[in-house]
């Protein structure tokens, strides 16, 4: 088999940058090298992977299917190099995947606790959406995932975490709970969407919406307005006075989980008791 990591990395660079020219610049190689590597890869798999046109490049159907495997193979190699190069004082490597909204108040606490209490553990953190976290878990790229979804595949263990409390916050203490023209809708899962629709059935559709709380919070702090944000995510800004939790507004709950690959759960017997002390809302609503 002539396939090598350089060809896969080049393929992924083309996908990421959207053109062979930009991929060559990103990889610091000539365009002819990028073209030759892509041709070699397409010959190896027996399918066209990239459709080239004047404005750039896009994946063929075969390319879409290969992309997931290419990411896994290059990721495993990167992880292997990292782990084999660790100093002798490190006895184990822990790769943590985390939803962006769970990192500031839960992921960071877990990371710090492991770092402080188990200094012989090397830590690596990857942020991603639910689909990507599941993919990384299933492919063995991460050992555990802080996530809002508890779907299991294969040998995995789920630890339920305290619910995220979604509270209505605003940059103005006087903002109305209902019919705020500056209200921003922040996606927080199907259950929240249904409960929110029922609680505010007579409200207009928000003019602004964001796919996660991290982006929604950033928008509020820059431009003002109100939105439902996880309390743990908003709490530092409430404490500083940048945000105000609006009284009288309904509070919604969002389930959160720590999902571990089975070998991780078996290996780290200290993890479960550690969870009870650090992975919770420090100031529950």
Image (spheres, rainbow, N blue to C red):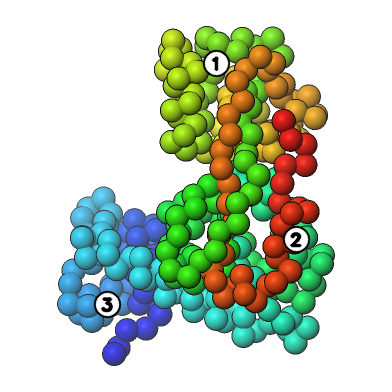
Q: Secondary structure at mark 1?
A: loop
Question: Residue 179: image x %, image y %?
Answer: 52, 9
- How would you rate the neighbour count of disc 1 (Cα within 10 Å): few for under 14, some for 14-19, many for 20 or more? some
Residue at 60% of width from left, 72% of height from top? 264
Residue corresponding to mark 3 = 41
- Badge 3 crowding class, 10 Å Cα cut-off, few under 14, some 14 to 19, many 20 or more, is many
Mark closer to the observer (1, 3): 1
Q: Nearer the viewer, residue 282 or 128?
A: 282
The number of numbered badges drawn on the structure is 3
Check if mark 1's residue and mark 3's residue have beta carbons within 8 Å. no
Query: What residue is rendered at 32% in x and 84% in y?
Result: 3
Q: Earlier in the sequence, mark 1 or mark 2?
A: 1
User: Tag on residue 26?
Assistant: none
Closer to the eye: label 1 or 2: 2
Task: Determine the CA span between mark 2 and mark 3.
Answer: 46 Å
Q: Which residue is mark 1?
A: 182
* Whole-number angstrom distance, CA of label 1 to CA of label 3: 51 Å
Quarter of the image that includes the N terminus: bottom left
Kindly identify the residue that appears in the image at 70 percent across and 62 percent down. 272
In the figure, is residue 75 to the left or right of 55?
right
Compared to 49, does 198 lie above or below?
Answer: above
Mark 1 or mark 3: whose residue is earlier in sequence: 3
Which one is in front, 18 or 83?
A: 83
Residue 229 position in % (x across, y down)? 61, 31
Task: Confirm whether residue 33 shows in the render.
Answer: no
Compared to residue 226, the image places residue 68 above or below, namely below
Mark 2 burial class by Cα count in 10 Å: few <14, some 14-19, many 20+: some
To which residue does mark 2 refer? Answer: 274
Residue drawn at the location 48% of the way across and 16% of the way down? 200
User: Which is nearer the N-term, disc 2 or disc 3?
Assistant: 3
Q: Nearer the viewer, mark 2 or mark 3?
A: 2
């Amino acid at each position: 088999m002539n396939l090598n990591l350089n060809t896969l990395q080049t393929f992924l660079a083309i996908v990421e940058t959207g053109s062979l020219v930009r991929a060559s610049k990103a990889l610091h190689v000539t365009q002819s090298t990028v073209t030759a590597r892509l041709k070699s890869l397409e010959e190896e798999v027996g399918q066209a992977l990239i459709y080239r046109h004047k404005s750039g490049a896009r994946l063929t159907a075969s390319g879409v299917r290969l992309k997931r495997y290419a990411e896994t193979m290059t990721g495993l190699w990167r992880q292997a190099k990292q782990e084999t190069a660790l100093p002798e004082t490190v006895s184990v490597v822990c790769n943590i995947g985390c939803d962006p909204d769970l990192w500031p108040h839960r992921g960071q606490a877990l990371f710090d606790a492991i770092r402080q209490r188990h200094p012989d553990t090397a830590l690596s953190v990857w942020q991603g959406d639910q689909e990507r976290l599941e993919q990384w878990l299933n492919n063995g790229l991460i050992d555990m995932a802080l996530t809002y979804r508890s779907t299991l595949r294969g040998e995995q263990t789920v630890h339920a975490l305290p619910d995220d409390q979604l509270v209505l916050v605003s940059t103005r203490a006087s903002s109305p709970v209902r019919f705020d023209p500056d209200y921003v809708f922040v996606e927080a899962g199907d259950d929240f969407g249904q409960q929110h629709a029922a609680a505010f059935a007579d409200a207009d559709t928000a003019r602004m919406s964001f796919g996660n709380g991290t982006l929604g919070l950033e928008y509020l702090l820059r431009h003002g307005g109100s939105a439902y944000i996880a309390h743990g995510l908003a709490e530092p800004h409430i404490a500083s006075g940048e945000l105000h939790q609006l009284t009288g507004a309904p509070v919604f709950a969002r389930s959160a989980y720590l999902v571990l690959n089975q070998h991780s759960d078996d290996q780290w017997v200290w993890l479960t008791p550690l969870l009870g002390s650090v992975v919770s809302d420090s100031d529950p609503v």
